Image (spheres, rainbow, N blue to C red):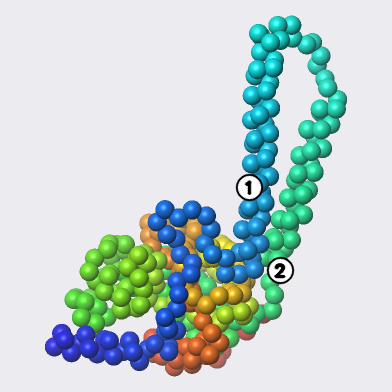
Amino acid sequence: MRLMTKFLALFSIFLALPATAQQALETVGKPIPGGFGFQPAATELARDLQFLDWLILVIITAITIFVTGLIIYIIFRFSRKNNPIPAKFTHHTPIEIAWTIVPIVILVFIGSFSLPVLFKSQEIPEADITIKVTGYQWYWGYEYVDHGFDFDSFMLDAAYEIDDEANGWGPDQPMGTPGIRGEIANAKLEYFGYAPDEFLLATDTAIVIPVNKVVVMQLTGADVIHSWAMPAFGVKQDAVPGRLSQLWFSAEREGIYFGQCSELCGKSHAYMPITVKVVSQEVYDAWLKGAIEDEQYTILPESMKVASN
């Protein structure tokens, strides 16, 4: 009986491939052990932010070296041994003008690069796809507002709606305390096509979007403040109860990307990851058709659909 159950589970995976948009996608954006630096930039926004970070790092490094060298010079040049008779002046007008003007020039220079990046991220373009994102304690809800369906997304090991017993993983696991690595968690990762090191990153249901399309996300919180962050896309926006904020991106590379709630929101804050799959337009259209028809998604009545901006 268990063998038959596992066979049916594998067969269901085969049938579900077009709907899950999992066709051997490369994992592009995720944290790695001992990682140093940014995740690969998959959007124009992320490239701009990473360049800005590099530019500011160069500037502050130069300032640090200059100030450190100046302090070392002063320590030796004006020590009691080398300068037994100290000067008695109280002002030095050229230096005072310099240390006022130079920081202003530096800040204006940084602003000339940073403000355009800020405006680009805050000026929401016309959307090809609009997704409403709701943060809950402790999972994410997504609504494809132009197509009238929504779904919830749980960390894979804590996804209580998965029928563990039917898939041959033993008795159904309650929500309980997420993050406990075990055989069932490994089996779920393999079942959904994720690598073992993607534990605590993968979700049972992912956002699927087509490559090179403008995606606008409308964010809110259902209980406390959450924050939807996707490092490889260069976006992070708080989801505040009672408010509707927005962010946008256009992913330029197909693959699987992982993010995380980035606002402390309670005891299971660490266990509400984000999974985004960027696929071709053809795969997206097939997934969208299957998602709308799939019983696991909540289909919204026409009167509750939210029009895209």
Is residue 242 visible in the rendered image? The answer is no
Q: CA distance from mark 1 to mark 2?
A: 26 Å
Question: Which residue lies most toward the top here?
Answer: 85
Q: Earlier in the sequence, mark 1 or mark 2?
A: 1
Residue shown at the point (61%, 64%) measured from the top left? 46
In the rendered image, the vertical position of residue 110 relative to residue 44, given as above or below: above
In the rendered image, the vertical position of residue 25 relative to residue 40, given as above or below: below
Q: How many marks?
A: 2
Relative image position of residue 68 (x, y in whole percent): 64, 30
Q: In what element is the residue under mark 1?
A: helix
Question: Which residue lies most toward the right here?
Answer: 93
Residue in the foreground of this view, choosing between 165 and 299: 165
Number of the front mark, 1 or 2: 1
In the rendered image, the vertical position of residue 282 relative to residue 157, given as above or below: below
Amino acid type assigned to the residue bearing label 2 in the image: Glu
Amino acid type assigned to the residue bearing label 1 in the image: Leu
Relative image position of residue 40 (x, y in whole percent): 54, 64
Question: What residue does disc 1 label?
Answer: 57
Relative to 299, is 5 on the left or the right?
left
Question: What residue does disc 2 label?
Answer: 123
Residue in the foreground of this view, choosing between 30 and 82: 82
